[in-house]
Amino acid sequence: MAATCSFQKMLTPTPKTPSSSPLSSSPFITPLSTRPRRTTRSLVVLATSIDAKPTVLVAEKLGEAGLELLKTFANVVCSYNMSPEELCTKISLCDALIVRSGTKVTREVFESSTGRLKVVGRAGVGIDNVDLSAATEHGCLVVNAPTANTIAAAEHGIALLTSMARYIAQADASIKAGKWQRNKYVGVSLVGKTLAVMGFGKVGSELARRAKGLGMHVIAHDPYASADRARAIGVELVSFDEAISTAHFISLHMPLTPATSKMFNDESFSKMQSGVRIVNVARGGVIDEEALVRALNGGIVAQAALDVFTVEPPPTDSQLVLHENVTVTPHLGASTMEAQEGVAIEIAEAVVGALKGELAATAVNAPMVPAEVLSELAPYVALAEKLGRLAVQLVAGGSGLKSVKVAYASARGPDDLDTLLLRAMVTKGLIEPISSVFVNLVNADFIAKQRGLRITEERIVLDGSPALPIEFIHVQIANVESKFSSAISDSGEIKVEGRVKDGKPHLTKVGSFDVDVSLEGSLILCSQVDQPGMIGKVGSILGEENVNVNFMSVGRIAPRKQAIMTIGVDEEPSRQALKKIGEIPAIEEFVFLKL
Ligand SMILES: NC(=O)c1ccc[n+]([C@@H]2O[C@H](COP(=O)([O-])OP(=O)(O)OC[C@H]3O[C@@H](n4cnc5c(N)ncnc54)[C@H](O)[C@@H]3O)[C@@H](O)[C@H]2O)c1
Ligand SMILES: O=C(O)[C@H](O)COP(=O)(O)O
């Protein structure tokens, strides 16, 4: 077994390099202070600043409290009613974009951002107006504000339900037109009627509670909701067909997805009781609007109350909107003072947090990593990225990069170790030094796949106490040549291995050599036959250059046999200094690696 000796310069304060900050290891985005700004096109349409503050483009009206919060951290540009072309032009100068439901954040928007856009904040729940695949492919995190408008939407649903049942809107219009039609607007009562809540999530369940308070019998359909939760508020979960065929009133609360698109169509209307009344405060697209007009004209649907439409705003000559038995509002479900202030704060906090590189609790296009997992794995996140960075820099040019194995050695059972984040960080470390893409937890798997890079994971199960989540991680790259042949392990792959020591990532193995060097600054690896004076020779070349050595370690097969000297440096040595190191007669090969 190779022996290791290491020396740390105790008097040298550890530099705070960007790469040692927890932010730079952000699984989501590279914090703005450390990320190179891309050159933007000459069309300067935003008041860009030359300071380091990020720029947040707010594309739709946002509550004042949220804007104030954003301004404490970013340059905030409010630009409402932009055309798609204007948005695509402005986006290349923005780090974050905040929208409501009125802005389509298409693939073109992400492409036009040329890599700068890192966060899209949806100030509300529905994210059907954001192309999530495109966001993920571009490494752009999408966050939403899922809770602050729930009550507003449920209240609006109840408002539509009650006003529809009593023809409030029609009667109001009639009286304002100078009429007094007491016999025409005889409504229906709600008490004792069956209401089917379709989609028993946040809004659906709040609406159900309120409807029960009005004395309605409430049933619900939601393939993913828990029957216990429904029972707790006195609601029975039933099948789709049972819900729509037994209800007097139907209220829609599911998201718009490919599966729910036009799920209310000729076939489903034909299964409903004649005279059914429908409320939609979810998304217009869940209803086939032409089929609804047919059902209204055919008497199956007595009335509909709609807050949302397939196309918003709907055409002014829309038969549905103009139908006398239809009550409409212009997507007002979330529009209360309270909800808008709440949503604005919720989204501003999420966007600022994401721009700072923090994990966002409301991320919709990134795998969720629970906070407790994140805090325990934080030092390993940095280690994983640095091992990836080291390993890829050891590959000889032209070798290609196709197959990487990451192994985690731990005394914990496989189910007790969530490696999703670590794999993403190894991927980030492997890909960023060799390409111009930014890799984060959002797009790591996509980028790896796109590059044809296969990353496999392996668990090494250790005996002993599982106090530490991981003992060591090793990264192996197969089927490549190395520019530093000593990095090739006995099994023929480039191999680097690391551990966390005192909360800091350390490199503990290169190829088959044990080493021990703190992963800060940059590294010089030298292969040599172990002999006296080598550390002094290299150290004095670096000293002449005023390059600060922060760590040195020699790993050797046996005294005076083959060895690897690992030198951690705070500054990058000049080419000349590196050349001089290479010219030391005993040094067989060396490599300079940036962390
Ligand atoms: N009109 C407005 O201003 C307004 C305001 C808030 C929310 N909304 C919309 O309301 C919808 C629900 O919002 P939420 O906050 O309750 O979301 P949520 O995620 O809490 O609830 C959605 C529910 O729909 C269920 N669902 C999914 N597929 C379904 C299917 N095929 N059939 C039945 N149920 C299904 C889910 O299991 C989930 O329980 C969203 O589309 C949102 O955009 C509209
Ligand atoms: O999904 C939502 O949150 C609602 O539809 C509200 O949309 P809005 O922010 O455009 O009002």
Image (cartoon, helix red, strand yellow):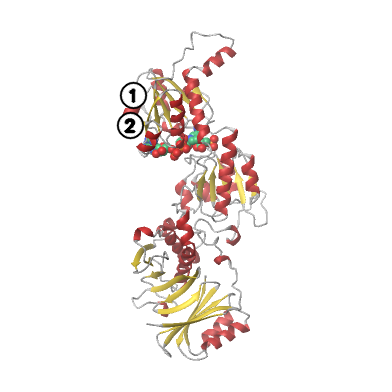
Residue at the location (36% across, 71% down)? 479
Where disc 1 sits, the SS reads helix
Ligand 1 found in image quarter: top left
Estimate how packed mark 1 is, as few (under 14), some (14 to 19) or many (20 or more) residues with alpha carbons within 10 Å.
Answer: some
Note whether residue 325 is visible. no
Q: What residue lies at 44% left-to-right and 16% top-to-bottom?
A: 188
**Mark 2 or mark 1, which has the lower sequence index?**
2
Q: In which quarter of the image is residue 224?
A: top left
Residue picked out by circle 2 = 238
In the picture of the structure, the residue carrying the numbered disc 1 is: 246
Quarter of the image for residue 53 reads bottom right
Comparing 580 with 173, the one in front is: 173
Relative vertical location of residue 330 with respect to residue 111 in this rendering, above or below: above
Q: Does the residue labelled 1 lie within 8 Å of ligand 1?
A: no
Q: Quadrant of the image for the N terminus?
A: bottom left
**Residue at image location 50% in from the left, 32% down from the top:** 153
